[in-house]
Amino acid sequence: MRTYSSGDMAKLYCKECDGCGDCCRCMGDTIELDPYDAFQLTYGLRKDFASLIGPVVGLHENGGMVLPFMQTRPIPEEEQRARGMHFADGQEPEECIFLSADGRCQIHGFRPGICRLFPLGRQYAEDGRSQCYFMVEEVTCDYPKTKVRIDKWLGIPDLEEYEAFKIRWHSLVKRVQERLSTPGADDAFRRKISTLFLQEFYIKSYLGTDFYEEVGRRMGQVEPLF
Ligand code: SF4
Ligand code: SF4
């Protein structure tokens, strides 16, 4: 598999994109949110994170932890017919709640990191010290793509700091998930840790802080526990 760094060029831009919206359908609960996404969403929507849980953000279990993901909405059959939509067998007829009727992202400026990446994915080194990008196999359309520099594609300011945060966050979550998967971890302990993470890294606001400094401080408090 070919891997890339943020300064590399990759075939990402779909010049002929007609906004069919397929990129944002049938994704289930795969758009998992990290604290930077939570910060961006609360800032962009001018809402506190707790009030987003339910209508905008779902909670699911991943590796014993409860983590937030972007909500989708089911597309009723009548709407599928009216819009000429077809879903393959086994595909759930659903789309992101922020996908507009004309196939555009309504929160483009503060969309989650996974959406910014697509059609790239992020891969972390085994030792948890670095990360790289790779092309996701199942791109949803056959339109030709033109090359773009990955850092431009992501459009995230202070990308070095962001990548350092992603590596540290991934490493912390992985350690917690490993710990919660051990036979000694009971449900009460899982609930306690999940509540701590939700409260400390998502619900507690980052507004008015330097995000990287603040999330680093919060991670620094929790890391010694794992
Ligand atoms: S599937 Fe292709 S045409 Fe449709 S929204 Fe995605 S990039 Fe655009
Ligand atoms: S947030 Fe925007 S880009 Fe991401 S899945 Fe929803 S509509 Fe698509």
Image: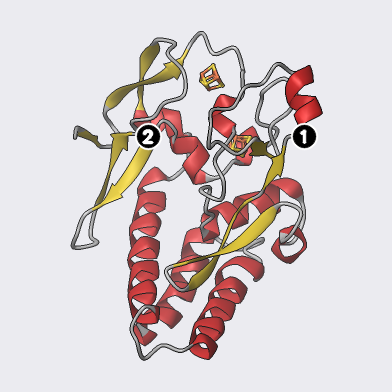
Q: Is residue 6 visible?
A: no
Callout 1 secondary element = loop
Q: Residues within 10 Å of mark 1 (few under 14, many from 20)?
A: few
Earlier residue among tags 1 and 2: 1
Single out the mark in the foreground, 1 or 2.
Answer: 1
- The image quarter containing residue 111 is top right
- Identify the residue under disc 1: 76
- The image quarter containing residue 168 is bottom left
Q: Residues within 10 Å of mark 2 (few under 14, many from 20)?
A: many
Identify the disc placed on residue 120.
2
Q: Is residue 126 visible?
A: yes
In the rendered view, tell whether residue 58 sits above or below residue 138.
Answer: below
The three-letter code of the residue at mark 1 reads: Pro
- Residue 21 at x, y percent in the picture: 61, 24
* Label 2, ligand 1: CB separation under 8 Å: no
In the rendered view, tell whether residue 183 sits above or below residue 143.
Answer: below
